[in-house]
Image: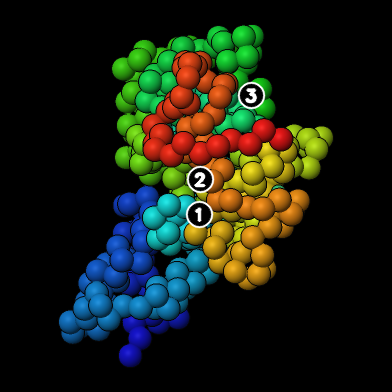
Amino acid sequence: MSYGGEETYNDSHRAFLQAFMARSTMTLDEAKPVLAAISSVHENREILPADITSSDLTTWISTINSAISPLDLEIRSLTHQTSQARVFALVNTTSDALTQLATTYTADEIAFVKRVLDAMFETNNTARSEAMVVSGMQAVQLAKVSGDNGNGRRRESRALAREDGTGSTGGAAQPLSMREAESVMERLVQEGWLEMSVGRNYMLSPRALMELRTWLVDTYNDEDDEAGNERIKFCLACKEIITVGQRCPRRQCPARLHDTCAPRFFRTQQSQACPTCRTEWTGENFVGERAFAGSSGNRGARRSGGGGGGGGDSSSQQQMDG
Ligand SMILES: [Zn+2]
Ligand SMILES: [Zn+2]
């Protein structure tokens, strides 16, 4: 017996869609009790969460997606880069997340969010250290409008320079207070745009990666970058954006793989060589916050001696200079 709902969109689907709107994302395990409750009412008998299968969920979602596509909405899914859970989110297919945030955040708050994204994908995403996270301390410092971006020169937010009509009306962004910056970060976590990493840094959530995919590529990857120099990179195996995972030991090589995609990938190609440059892949060179460890520069607070910058600094891997 399957509980995929009927193929015609009905009140049950509407109820499930409402459950989706009430929370930012759902995994299969989170969807099971919701679908069981809705199915129980619809069929007027008790259906248990354990009765709901992954293929039931797929059927529900495909019926809902047919109904909501004229509204430019779609339920999409992405594998969480560290927990490996399949995460489902209701995504707006025509406007990016920043445009949506503009309806509930002020223009100055949006400008702050863009400075946070610049810090993740520019300041903390260099050839030496692709951390792609920000610490709470760094986020609070971004409450200020402009200043030193780490290269010793003042510059406008790259995200703002690519103004896409969200928020700013041409006036210069005003700074937030530190308290306001903290509260925006808290809201972004609550609303499912950001999440805390193992090492207590802020990183983009699966929902943000799904909604911002195109925007991130348009904003941070230059068309005239040489191949492989793009700031936003994709896992060679699953083709999704990678912000946590492994990199090729050869620094100039753009090959990246998620931690869980890597073993499967090398088993399939029956060799431990990087598919791009044939360097032996050690699995000890990282993207994500683990890139802070062993990074020898680029962070404001450089320590002398034994490595060790940001959180999650548990490994002391050798960084090979290319
Ligand atoms: Zn992958
Ligand atoms: Zn390589």
Q: Quadrant of the C terminus?
A: top right
- Nearer to us: label 2 or label 1: 1
Eyeballing the image, is 97 above or below 124?
Answer: below
Which x, y percent locates residue 35?
Answer: 29, 71
Tag 3 near tag 1, CB within 8 Å: no
Under mark 2, the amino acid is Val
Query: In percent of the image, x 44 and y 45: which residue is there?
Result: 205
Query: In percent of the image, x 58 and y 15: which residue is there?
Result: 150
Q: Can residue 86 be seen in the rendering of this structure?
A: yes
Label 3's element? helix
> Relative to 15, is 321 on the left or the right?
right
Q: According to the image, label 3 marks what residue?
A: 158
Under mark 1, the amino acid is Asp
Which x, y percent locates residue 131?
Answer: 52, 34
Eyeballing the image, is 93 above or below 190?
Answer: below
Residue at disc 1, CB closer than 8 Å to ligand 1:
no
